[in-house]
Amino acid sequence: MSEGARNTRQFRGAWSGGGGTGGIGSASYRDGDGGIGSPRYRGVNTGILDEQVLSLVFRSINWDPQALCTAASVNRRLRAVAERVLWRELCISRAPRMVASLTAAAGVGVGAAPPPPGRIGGGWPALAKLLSFCCGAAGTAVAVPGHLTRVSRFSKTSGRSFLSRRCRSDMLYVSDPCEHAVPGADDDLGAYRGVFRWFMRSRTRACLLGHQAELDPRVRCPYCGARVWNMVAANLVPRGASRRMGSDEGRLEYYVCVSGHVHGNCWLAHLTSSEGEHDDDPDSDDASEGGSGWDGHVAP
């Protein structure tokens, strides 16, 4: 097995079973609530297993996701520290404004109790994987394997293109498509991913439930393993989504899992250089200080 394949397998395995709503998803944002000193983790906070020591170690290597996966795979105690602190800190380091938006309690609806501050839908390990890993396109006629991403740009502007008119009050971050050349195909295949803020309280989820949309029996979320809705089958894909991705109408797949993670793919139309450029955004959040093999760009 090549070194690259071994790293990718290790990267995937470190997240398996850890991206759901449990674990780190129940921890608060940068606080001491229920931490390593709690009964659940008693005896963990010693020596190199001290969360502060590990945070300093991974900060010194700029939160390299592959190194973090390796550490989380060593034993149960290191995995506990990763789930309690390290995945969250990786997300904050890579995409501070995006994380701040996703964990904000504003806009939850009149009369609704605000969500606990700092919690993230789907859990921190799943969000860290989403920021760092392109899931490819396993469900298409041509299988495109997943891989670590070197540059990722997430945008609320792109996210709005994926929201139907009745759901425009939701907040959704969507990445630019990750382009893959497909042998024998004239066009490239673009794989994209994203995440809703507080999906359980979103109008998109309410519309899916109101339409009694069925969960797809064949597809699972590549980030948390949860079941997904096929938004094309539910007829909830705005026309602007294909245009935003640079794809022709009817050539886009779009899935949303019950935790609020988005993934999909599209066949990319050939664009001129001017058509492929992004609008300048003075409020963009450039998180480009990537570690070994990864950096990110996050825009609102």
Image (tube, grey):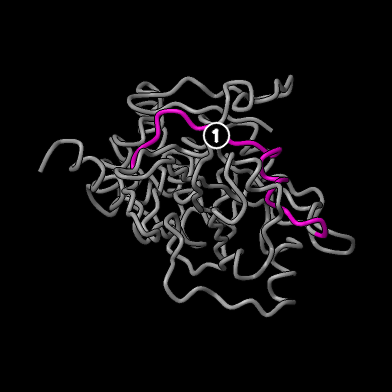
Q: Position of residue 300 (x, y in %)?
A: 69, 33
**Closer to us: 30 or 207:** 207
The count of marks equals: 1
Q: Residues within 10 Å of mark 1 (few under 14, many from 20)?
A: some
Residue situated furthest left in the rendering: 1
**Closer to us: 181 or 27:** 181
Q: Quadrant of residue 141?
A: bottom left
Type of amino acid at the residue the image marks with label 1: Ile
**Closer to us: 61 or 148:** 148
User: For the point 74% across and 19% down, which residue is it?
Assistant: 282
Q: Is residue 221 above or below residue 126?
A: below
User: For the point 30% across and 36% down, which residue is it?
Assistant: 66
User: For the point 49% across and 69% down, which residue is it?
Assistant: 227
Q: Position of residue 238 (x, y in %)?
A: 71, 55
Q: Per the image, is 228 magenta?
A: no
Residue situated furthest right in the rendering: 110
Q: Quadrant of residue 96?
A: top right
Q: Is residue 176 above or below residue 285?
A: below
Where disc 1 sits, the SS reads: helix
Residue 128 lies left or right of residue 280; in this view the side is: left
Q: Quadrant of residue 224?
A: bottom left
User: For the point 57% across and 44% down, which residue is it?
Assistant: 247
Q: Is residue 235 above or below residue 104?
A: below
| Residue that badge 1 annotates | 92
Q: Position of residue 259 (x, y in %)?
A: 57, 62
Q: Per the image, is 165 magenta?
A: yes
Q: Which residues are magenta?
A: 147-166
